[in-house]
Amino acid sequence: MSQPSPAPVSLDLASLDLPPLDPAAAWVACRHRIVRAARKSGRDPATVHLTAVSKTQPWSAIAPVLAAGQTVFGENRVQEAQARWGERRQGLELRLIGPLQSNKAREAVALFDVIETLDRPRLAAALVQAMEKLGVTPRLYVQVNTGEEPQKAGVIPSELPAFLALCRSTYGLTLEGLMCIPPADAPPGPHFALLAKLARRHGLDRLSMGMSGDYEIAIRHGATDVRIGSALFGARPPTPVAAG
Ligand SMILES: *Cc1c(COP(=O)(O)O)cnc(C)c1O
């Protein structure tokens, strides 16, 4: 009996959101580029830290990067991060890089080593309360809306001095650095330069800036923490993938 010939399979690879063939190789390449960019700017490469942004990525993409030795991961949602990392927390540094609602402050303080998105008095108050209650002190960055975009989180630059004073004096918070996400449609350099200037002026050492498309520019402007997702793991799936 003759078999019907199988219908030709057509695979739209782009629609599958596959991770890069080798995320570990992408990680090595990315670290080389970080070192090269730091040296080119006359900076010590050890002063530039890589946050691997694992939000919404499938575990199949994250596992090779974790196995290669990456220990610092960035997430933008508390619940998703809890699901992905809660059981694998040991030995890692988790950084919250997405907007934080005040009513999630306690969960965020319990999970994250670093919260990069402090940007309003109510959140500062909620974080202080959570830190006192839980007896832990995540390191804090203030997010600055350098492009003054209405839809974007972050303190606008003119309001930064008052906000930093409030955090430090009223709430007694120790702040580690500043973070920004430049407008998507503008050259990022001036935004990185502005963030660096603000950090110098206010005695803050760390600068979280630079993503897959612009981290070398950010390093030139003094970034100490680059947040890189798609260059390591591939294009992000549009919705969170269930943590594996
Ligand atoms: C998603 C995200 C990143 C990573 O972006 P890539 O372009 O994939 O590197 C960095 N920072 C923040 C705040 C993000 O939300």
Image (cartoon, rainbow, N blue to C red):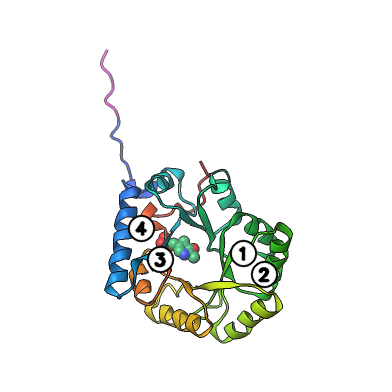
Q: Is residue 159 visible?
A: yes
Q: Which residue is mark 1?
A: 100
Q: Earlier in the sequence, mark 2 or mark 3?
A: 2
Q: Is residue 7 above or below residue 165?
A: above
Q: Residue at x 42, y 78 (%)?
A: 192
| Ligand 1 within 8 angstroms of badge 4 C-beta | yes
Instruction: Give yes or no for contact between labels 3 and 1 (Cβ–Cβ under 8 Å).
Output: no
Which residue is under mark 4? 231
Residue named by callout 2: 123
Task: Report the residue at 55% width, 63% height from top.
Answer: 98
Per the rendered image, the range of residues in magenta is 1-6
Q: Of callouts 3 and 1, which one flags the residue occurring earlier in the amino acid sequence?
A: 1
Query: Who comes first in sequence, dot 2 or dot 1?
Result: 1
Question: Residue at (70%, 67%) from the top-left corner?
Answer: 128
Cα–Cα span, label 2 and label 3: 25 Å
Residues at marks 2 and 1 touching, judged by CB atoms closer than 8 Å: yes
